[in-house]
Amino acid sequence: MNVLIFGSGQLARMMYLAGCPLGVYISAVDVNKEQVVNPVSKARRTISIKQAIEDADAITVEFEHVPEHLLQLAHQSGKLKPGIEAILAGADRVREKRLLEKLNIPNCPHQIIQDIEQIAPAMNQLGDQLILKASRDGYDGYGQWRLTNRADLVKLEDDLSQLDLTSVPLIAEKMLKFDRELSLVGTRSQDGSYVFYPLVENRHHQGQLHLTIAPATNISDALTQQAQDAFKKLGDELGYVGVLAVEFFQIGDKLLVNEIAPRVHNSGHWSMQGADTCQFENHIRAVCDLPIGQTDNYKITGMINIIGLGQFSSTMLAIPGSHLHWYGKEPRAKRKLGHFNLTAETYQQLGKRLSSLTEYLPEEDFPLLVPAAKELQIF
Ligand code: ATP
Ligand code: MG
């Protein structure tokens, strides 16, 4: 089988690696250069995008911000999974919020801003502390502005004055005081059946995911049910095929959807070691219409993103249960360069192993490790 992925970064790379043992051959489209490449070596393949589309049995994406003309080409082939509607909902926060509202899925109180003058009234409605998010092309906290008091409004209006808010509106969201962030990654098959990974906890620093704890601690059946219900409503509405990730804010025993990602997701990377079948393999299985692999016999796993750090030693591989996934990218500030997965039998053991990891890694680049290690050891 041949699968073509739009986008040629680390997610395409990990899907390629997961596809190999299945005998699924994967090519990727570098959407900036508009070239077909091998997603591991990045070597250019001497075929056109149109030819690669023709050759593919299934087409998918590694991220939602695929340029419109390329996405249309993929859509017109009739092979795109998930479908264009799901990808556009993930790419455009206005569409995403409309979808959540239509399906009555609880989400963050928000207003759509199409003119700078609408920010002050939004503050009256939502409160003085807001997060403004560009409706398109945002990821890893980019394209976001935080407003923590009214006095900063004038400066913010000035910063935003260059933006064309009529064509790319902002979403003003109430800044929530949530207990923690969770996400649900799962797969919907072509026959409409679902397979879920457990809910995981995601810890962010400066708007970027740094650490995932899988499964999240203290999850009631009711919470899992809420998350799966929201997921299924979205999956059924979109006729979804493949892996989908839904990010939540937990407030008490309620979940509010933050956003959806119509693809494999950073908060599912733990599954490469922690689950019987990882998210990358399950996505490939789903788009190729193969049976989905088991996800319920998992190990307790910590996933630690390596962000912006140019140099480190691989000696931490001596820690039992540790695995390194290095993406082979040029180091740059705030860039995700790789991740560690640390598996364990218990949360206490995971805490100890995270604590060992801190001995190898600078605290300034991995600020959430020490607190998580302490917390899990006393859990
Ligand atoms: P990513 O690509 O990493 O998922 P993103 O750029 O798409 O990020 P969001 O997920 O919307 O952006 O926001 C990034 C992080 O900022 C969230 O995970 C959360 O920690 C924080 N955040 C976002 N919205 C809110 C909110 N309304 N209230 C409080 N914190 C928020
Ligand atoms: Mg997010």
Image: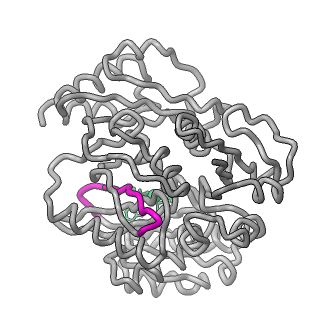
Quarter of the image where ligand 1 sits: bottom left
**From where the camera sits, is residue 147 visible?**
no
Q: Is residue 189 left or right of residue 288?
A: left
The residue sitting at 32% across, 46% down in the picture is 294
The residue sitting at 54% across, 67% down in the picture is 90
Q: Give yes or no for residue 262 being in the magenta stretch.
A: no
Foreground: 179 or 100? 100
145 vs 109: above or below: above
Foreground: 137 or 149? 137
Q: Is residue 378 left or right of residue 311?
A: left
The residue sitting at 54% across, 79% down in the picture is 95
**x and y percent of residue 216 in the render?**
24, 47
Please state the extent of the stretch shown in magenta in the rendering: 177-191
The residue sitting at 23% across, 58% down in the picture is 179
**From where the camera sits, is residue 257 visible?**
yes
**x and y percent of residue 219 in the render?**
17, 54
**x and y percent of residue 328 in the render?**
64, 29
